[in-house]
Image (cartoon, rainbow, N blue to C red):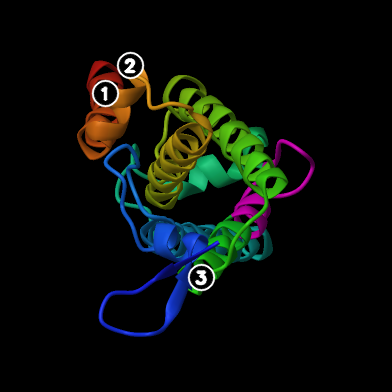
Amino acid sequence: MTLPTHGSGTTATTTDVEADLEPADRPLTERRLGLLLLVTGLIGFAAAFVLTVEKFWLLTNPFYVPSCTVNETVSCGPVMSSPQAELFGFPNPLLGIAGFAVVATTGAALLAGGRLAGWYWAGLQVGAVLAVVFVAWLISQSLFVIGALCPYCMVVWAVTFTICWYVTLRNLAAHRRPRPDGLLDFAVRYHLTLLVLGLAAVAGLVVVTVQLR
């Protein structure tokens, strides 16, 4: 189906018109979501890459002091040297390098106007949820078992939560028919506020735990 454009003889498909709209019940257009995924994916990739390099230097030189070492509490060394840092038999940051590369590539594709299939979004959703579960476990291990915080890891935590939040909102908004009221509508309308509050809650937990130690 095509729709005529005003003031010209050209036509635009319904899909093209819808792509330029920003419905009130969507937190982001596909292209804005693409920008968010590209930026967060690149930030997460950079943090994971630096962690991998630091891990390599630490393995080759046991006296090496990681660049993210601030004091006894804020230090990557104890975290990198812990068994939790190699849960699957290899450094955890390698998972981040692969995962964030996929996220950044997805963002670039959306920015270029690409249309991704439903199965791709479902796979991205599963990956994002698993990443959040893994990050939540790592947070608990850092706070209550290892007793140290890695700044680069905290960057990864923040972008992982952000990616999962917006991918989830996008998928829920894309599948709801018709537009519902209630909790989902509230979450979509105040997406940024809720994200900030969530990240602040995690930061508060970290600060309180460190203070009580």
Separation of residues labelled 2 and 3 (CA atoms): 30 Å
Q: Secondary structure at mark 2?
A: helix
Q: Are marks 2 and 1 in contact (CB under 8 Å)?
A: yes
Q: Is residue 90 magenta?
A: yes
- Check disc 3 and give the amino acid type: Gly
Please name whichever residue, 130 or 169, is drawn nearer the observer in this view of the structure: 169
Quarter holding the C terminus?
top left
Separation of residues labelled 2 and 1 (CA atoms): 5 Å
Please name whichever residue, 169 or 59, is drawn nearer the observer in this view of the structure: 169
Kindly identify the residue that appears in the image at 24 percent across and 33 percent down: 189
Q: Is residue 97 left or right of residue 90?
A: left
- Check disc 1 and give the amino acid type: Phe
Which dot marks residue 68?
A: none
State the extent of the magenta-drawn residues as a range. Answer: 86-99
Rendered view: 211 above or below 64 = above
Please name whichever residue, 154 or 197, is drawn nearer the observer in this view of the structure: 197
- Residue hosting label 1: 186
- Residue hosting label 3: 113
